[in-house]
Image: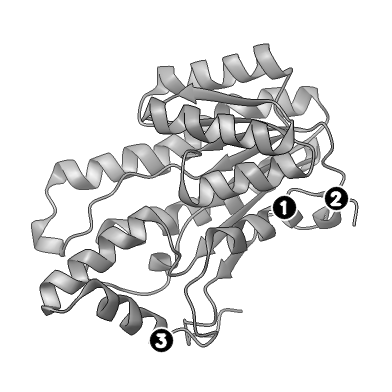
């Protein structure tokens, strides 16, 4: 199936590992040139080199903290200068603390809000003029299922994930006339370094092993396994392709059926 992505240009924040890295590789495999950003430069450069070696597409490693407006401005400017523009933005960067409500200080909340909510806002604000010049584009916000259910270790996640879903709809309505489609994806329990941190905390609090904590998490997922980063990347490929040209302002969950609530 031709997704119409050949020679497109994408920015993926939080692109050095987990969902971001899987998405960058999947896009490059479809002929997209990618710019990935993260705070840790060595892991970032390793990821870009691996993507380029596997696909032959250009892969830029640009160190950026999405909590810093100047870093985002540089990220977009360098992408445009070196790759030629921006067609796709995958807002994925996050930096949060897995802890019960009473353990979270103001700094923990504000850091998460700044990096994720405001980081997504800043990235979108920077790329939209370039997308408008190119006649359209795609923006995907990666949220999370904490937006739809409570968990004692994901307090700030629930707030930020609900926010980036709301942002996607509001922004989608304002830029659709420019050919820019904006959507949100809520991953469920996904095998990422951040999920491992949550499982480690759950294991410690329950005095069980990490393997036991993972087994408990999987027991609540009807498909019988964790969501993998590739599962998210596969949906992103479709959502940024020509095959999803009539989908905008939506939030789609990829959680293996774990949430029992019905969302209309």
Label 1 Cα neighbours within 10 Å, binned few <14 / some 14-19 / many ≥20: some
Please count the marks in the image: 3
Q: Which residue is mark 2?
A: 3
| Residue on which disc 3 sits | 220
Is residue 4 shown above or below 237?
above
* Pointer 3 local density, CA inside 10 Å: few below 14, some 14–19, many at least 20: some
Disc 1 to disc 2, C-alpha distance? 8 Å
Q: Which residue is mark 1?
A: 237
Rendered location of residue 223, percent (x, y): 55, 84
* Residue nearest the viewer, comparing 57 with 54: 54
Residue for point 24% across, 41% down: 110
Q: At 58% from the left edge and 55% from the top edge, which residue is drawn?
A: 184
Q: Does residue 1 appear to the left or right of 219 in the view shown?
A: right
Between disc 1 and disc 2, whose residue precedes?
A: 2
* Pointer 2 local density, CA inside 10 Å: few below 14, some 14–19, many at least 20: some
Q: Determine contact: label 1, label 2, CB under 8 Å.
A: yes
Q: Quadrant of residue 85?
A: top right
Displayed quadrant of residue 43: top left
The residue lying furthest to the front in this view is 53
């Amino acid at each position: 199936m031709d997704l119409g992505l050949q020679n497109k240009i994408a920015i993926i924040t939080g692109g050095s590992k987990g969902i971001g890295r899987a998405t960058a590789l999947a896009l490059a495999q479809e002929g997209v040139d990618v710019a990935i950003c993260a705070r840790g430069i060595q892991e970032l450069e390793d990821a870009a080199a691996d993507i380029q070696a596997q696909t032959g597409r250009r892969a830029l490693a640009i160190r950026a903290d999405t909590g810093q407006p100047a870093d985002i401005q540089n990220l977009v400017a360098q992408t445009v200068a070196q790759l030629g523009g921006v067609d796709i933005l995958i807002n994925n960067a996050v930096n949060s603390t897995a802890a019960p409500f009473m353990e979270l200080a103001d700094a923990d909340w504000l850091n998460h809000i700044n990096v994720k909510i405001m980081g997504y806002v800043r990235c979108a604000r920077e790329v939209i003029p370039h997308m408008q010049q190119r006649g359209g584009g795609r923006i995907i916000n990666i949220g999370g299922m904490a937006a739809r259910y409570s968990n004692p270790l994901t307090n700030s996640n629930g707030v930020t994930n609900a926010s980036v879903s709301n942002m996607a709809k509001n922004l989608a309505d304002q830029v659709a006339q420019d050919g820019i489609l904006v959507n949100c994806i809520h991953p469920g329990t996904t095998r990422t370094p951040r999920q491992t941190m949550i499982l480690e905390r759950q294991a410690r609090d329950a005095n069980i092993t990490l393997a036991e904590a993972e087994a408990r998490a999987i027991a609540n997922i009807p498909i019988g396994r964790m969501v993998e980063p590739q599962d998210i990347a596969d949906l992103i490929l479709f959502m940024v392709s020509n095959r999803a040209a009539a989908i905008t302002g939506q939030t789609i969950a990829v959680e293996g059926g774990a949430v029992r609530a019905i969302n209309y």
